[in-house]
Image (cartoon, rainbow, N blue to C red):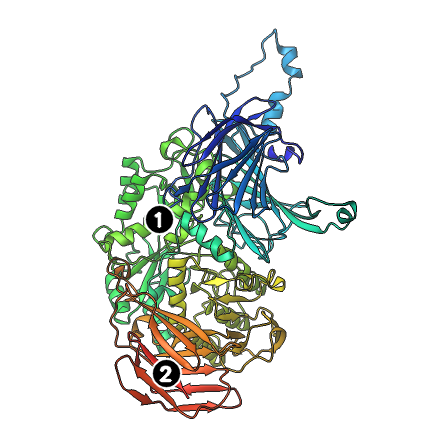
């Protein structure tokens, strides 16, 4: 509210250019507010790889202001900036990479980034830099006889209260701001851009909307049950990363602040600024798009990273260079997960597990929600329902399956509960504003909340997952962190009071959006530690922040069994993926309510082609295991899940790319087709890697869907029928309930398994088939990544295979992409299908490195132009080639 009182116009900040200090690390100078005369220190640096960082803090704060720790993986390596111009009121900094210049204007203070003479981004050009310096608390002005009249006419204190400077009321809740107002904000202008994306998590469209006539996008992690569609309120997670794209450039703004943050967006057309040579030319000025983005945060400092791309994939790498890449999941985690609030007891778990085998449906993991515990005490088991959890896990282990249990951050207040007693004794809970353990209501009733911002608490918490401490747990048990916004029933907005106190006496308002990030970090660490650092963890979290990708997976929370939620899940997942978190998914079928069979089928078909694939439902929902909707629907769901399982080699390879090169597994069309304007707003279809285009069916009783196959130079093939699509562009594709449209892009090779197993662990020895889709030049290229699927050996011992398949001039070769990796497998490529192969060959031969050439049996389908080679038995871990004559 206070920042909104500051309107567009000339900034009251002026840069003091005589205070400039240049060092190898950065450039520092002061700016001053013309009215309150408070000095702020500005620090600008360039980070290797086309990133600029701008920090603004008080030059002499009353006390230290909060600076977000632990999100950046390391202090970034900087490059020296040079002063290339310093004259009346202007300072120009040049980068080692001569493409970039930063121009600092003194009065009013403004910073502009230029690339090759073109302005890409400017800061404070609308004069909305806002920085509330810390002040001593106002003295209590109790009216005395002398100043009674003065006091009654003095409305400033009321005005202060009205603007929430020192305290604020939310209904019956009082937030006392011990350190007074400390909000910060800044505006950024993106020149030539009118498509902006990112800043999850909202139940909103892919393209961010103008907020000039409505609510700003809010980043404030909250437990919102059945969140409304098309709402800018923040839900469970926040990543303060915004991307802007135009045909020749992608840029990003990463606003590193974990307090409540609002983002205002305004796109407009402005006259193109060019040094005009004549009046006639001036009259011909083009209108250029311009997007203004205003960030406003409740506390902390201004610490912003400008990711200069210039491509989308560069921006993803730059963000990962700062916050880390997606953790490589264990392979089982890419299988199908079956969850419900709640599977009743050990018998129920066994029956559901048996149901999958009985109906021949692959699955990898069964999940237990809060009812599996002893009275919602996490790390325990209900003694009646789960009398022998180890035996139950042994049963699942024999089936090569896993168990996930829920572990929430709230701890039941019960002196007899060891976890509570120990945490209380050690002082590990978040405190209220008076320094007592904060107590709130959650599932167990009265609860205390572990202070995960404290490294000592995280270390202790990680220790709780050791097999000897967590009784009844085994190494097939993995973890789900829920309710970690944190959710506090009966709290303001169902979360913790902002004036609660954390480690080092920081207030909850400073760290709020980091709470879930820290719980997932500690949980992942616990799972790694219990295996002495050998095994990869799997942790799903509901609440997240920038960098959460390093610790596991996220999902979109409590959605509803409704067609609108299936539809909005696509842009929601694309937005989370672009913010660095590739391992994301939405509850298949919708968590709340009962999906009609058609909706459930369509959701399984969509989920099968999304990164995290879990069916989940609420306590109030009817049972909905995949075989409960009649034989026909069971068959269609079985087929969708099997399609997922045979595609796992491709999916696992994509996760390796996400892990090593920060490429999102699921990506919007525009990332692959950056110059194609018609893709910029597409949110009803997406790319899975660079090779597959997926168009889920999200309309009831659909008979056809309108699919955009982008790229005038591209060839697209029906993924199942192998038929080449007539042409690119927007096509009307007929659909039945049996499946959803999926297309393979010409020029790609997709590795698959020849058949699905009961779970991923049944599949290592199943042979491979390659789908080679030819482009206009009759070429194709693809990759396969392979390792043991569960350990860190790929990292520590370089035990992995990374193969490359290339088809060129009628020869398909298999070669090594990364020679540092070694992994032995007896697995073979048994079958190769060439899509778009022009004519029937006379002969086909295969030859392994150093081996003899041998004839290959082939079939050619003239109608679909597909060439199929079978019974190949070519080793996956060897070099070989196939020649088509």
The numbered mark, 2 or 1, whose residue comes first in the sequence reads: 1
Residue 792 shown left or right of residue 583 in the figure: left
Q: Secondary structure at mark 1?
A: helix
Q: Nearer the viewer, mark 2 or mark 1?
A: 2
Return the residue nearer the eye: 88 or 597: 88
Q: Does residue 337 show up?
A: no
The residue singled out by tag 2 in the image is 882
The percent coordinates of residue 122 (x first, y second) are 59, 41
Residue 790 shown left or right of residue 809 in the figure: left
In the rendered image, which quarter is residue 429 located in? top left
The residue singled out by tag 1 in the image is 521
Q: Crowding at label 2, few (<14), some or many (≥20) Cα neighbours within 10 Å?
A: many
Return the residue nearer the eye: 7 or 188: 188
Residue under the point 60% across and 32% down:
2
The percent coordinates of residue 338 (x first, y second) are 40, 66
Q: Does residue 16 show up?
A: yes
């Amino acid at each position: 509210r206070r920042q909104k009182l500051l309107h567009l116009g000339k900034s009251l900040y002026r840069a003091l250019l005589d205070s400039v200090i240049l060092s190898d690390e950065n450039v520092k100078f002061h700016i001053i507010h013309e009215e309150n005369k408070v000095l702020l220190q500005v620090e600008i640096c360039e980070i290797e790889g086309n990133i600029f960082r701008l920090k603004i803090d008080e030059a002499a704060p009353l006390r230290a202001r909060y600076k977000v720790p632990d999100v950046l993986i390391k202090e970034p390596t900087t490059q020296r900036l040079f002063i290339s111009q310093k004259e009346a009121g202007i300072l120009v900094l040049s980068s080692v990479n001569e493409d970039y210049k930063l121009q600092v204007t003194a009065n009013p203070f403004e910073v502009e980034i230029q690339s090759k003479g073109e302005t890409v981004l400017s800061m404070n050009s609308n004069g909305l830099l806002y920085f509330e310096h810390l002040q001593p608390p106002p003295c209590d002005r109790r009216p005395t006889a002398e100043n009674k009249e003065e006091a009654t006419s003095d409305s400033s204190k009321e005005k202060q209260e009205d603007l929430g400077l020192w305290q604020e009321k939310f209904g019956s809740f009082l937030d006392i701001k011990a350190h007074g107002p400390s909000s910060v904000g800044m505006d950024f202008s993106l020149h030539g851009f009118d498509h902006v994306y990112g800043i999850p998590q909202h139940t909103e469209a892919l393209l961010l909307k103008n907020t000039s006539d409505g609510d700003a996008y809010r980043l404030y992690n909250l437990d919102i049950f059945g969140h409304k569609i098309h709402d800018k309120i923040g839900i469970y997670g926040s990543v303060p990363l915004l991307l802007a794209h135009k045909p020749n450039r992608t840029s990003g703004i990463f606003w590193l602040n974990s307090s409540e943050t609002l983002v205002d967006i305004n796109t407009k057309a402005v006259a193109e600024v060019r040094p005009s040579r004549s009046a006639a030319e001036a009259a011909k000025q083009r209108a250029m798009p311009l997007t203004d983005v205003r960030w406003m945060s409740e506390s902390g400092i201004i610490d912003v990273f400008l990711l200069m791309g210039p491509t989308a994939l560069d921006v993803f790498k730059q963000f990962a260079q700062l916050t880390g890449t997606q953790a490589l999941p264990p392979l089982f985690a890419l299988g199908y997960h079956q969850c419900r609030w709640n599977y009743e007891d050990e018998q129920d778990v066994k029956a559901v597990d048996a149901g999958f085998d009985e109906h021949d449906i692959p699955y990898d993991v069964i999940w237990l929600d809060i009812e599996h515990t002893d009275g919602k005490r996490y790390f325990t088991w209900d003694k009646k329902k789960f009398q022998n959890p180890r035996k139950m896990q042994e049963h699942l282990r024999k089936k090569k399956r896993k168990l996930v249990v829920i572990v929430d951050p709230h701890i039941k207040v019960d002196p007899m509960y060891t976890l509570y007693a120990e945490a209380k004794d050690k002082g590990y809970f978040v405190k209220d504003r008076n320094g007592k353990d904060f107590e709130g209501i959650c599932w167990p009733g009265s609860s205390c909340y572990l202070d995960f911002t404290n490294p000592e608490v995280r270390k202790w918490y990680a220790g709780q997952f050791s097999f000897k401490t967590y009784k009844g747990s085994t190494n097939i048990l993995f973890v789900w962190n829920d309710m970690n916004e944190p959710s506090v029933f009966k709290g303001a907005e169902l979360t913790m009071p902002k004036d609660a106190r954390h480690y080092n006496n920081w207030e909850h308002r400073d760290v709020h959006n980091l709470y879930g990030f820290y719980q997932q970090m500690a949980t992942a660490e616990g799972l790694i530690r219990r295996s002495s650092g050998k095994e990869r963890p799997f942790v799903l979290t509901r609440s997240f922040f920038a960098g959460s990708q390093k610790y596991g997976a996220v999902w979109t929370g409590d959605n509803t069994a409704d067609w609108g939620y299936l539809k909005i899940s696509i842009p929601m997942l694309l937005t989370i993926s672009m913010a660095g978190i590739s391992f994301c998914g939405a509850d298949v079928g919708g968590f709340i309510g009962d999906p009609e069979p058609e909706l459930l089928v369509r959701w399984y078909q969509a989920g099968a082609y999304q990164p995290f694939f879990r069916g989940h439902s609420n306590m109030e929902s009817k049972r909905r295991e995949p075989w409960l909707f009649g034989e026909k629907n069971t068959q269609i769901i079985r087929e969708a899940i099997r399609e997922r399982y045979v595609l796992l080699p491709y999916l696992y390879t994509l996760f390796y790319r996400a892990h090593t090169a920060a490429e999102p597994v699921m990506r919007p069309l525009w990332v692959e087709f950056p110059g194609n304007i018609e893709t910029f707003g597409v949110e009803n279809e997406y790319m899975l890697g660079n090779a597959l285009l997926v168009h889920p069916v999200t309309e009831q009783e659909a008979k056809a869907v309108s699919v955009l196959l982008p790229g005038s130079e591209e060839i697209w093939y029906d993924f199942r029928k192998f038929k080449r699509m007539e042409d690119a562009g927007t096509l009307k594709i007929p659909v039945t309930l049996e499946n959803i449209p999926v297309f393979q892009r010409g020029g790609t090779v997709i590795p698959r398994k020849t058949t699905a197993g009961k779970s991923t662990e049944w599949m290592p020895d199943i042979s491979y088939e390659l789908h080679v889709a030819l482009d206009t030049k009759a070429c194709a290229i693809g990759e396969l990544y392979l390792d043991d699927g569960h350990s860190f050996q790929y990292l520590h011992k370089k035990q992995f295979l990374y193969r490359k398949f290339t088809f060129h001039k009628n020869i398909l070769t298999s070669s090594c992409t990364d020679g540092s990796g070694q992994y032995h497998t007896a697995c073979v490529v048994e079958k190769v299908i060439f899509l778009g192969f022009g004519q029937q060959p006379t002969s086909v031969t295969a030859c392994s490195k150093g081996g003899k050439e041998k004839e290959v049996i082939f079939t050619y389908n003239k109608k679909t132009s597909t060439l199929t080679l079978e019974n190949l038995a070519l080793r996956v871990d060897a070099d070989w080639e196939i020649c088509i004559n």
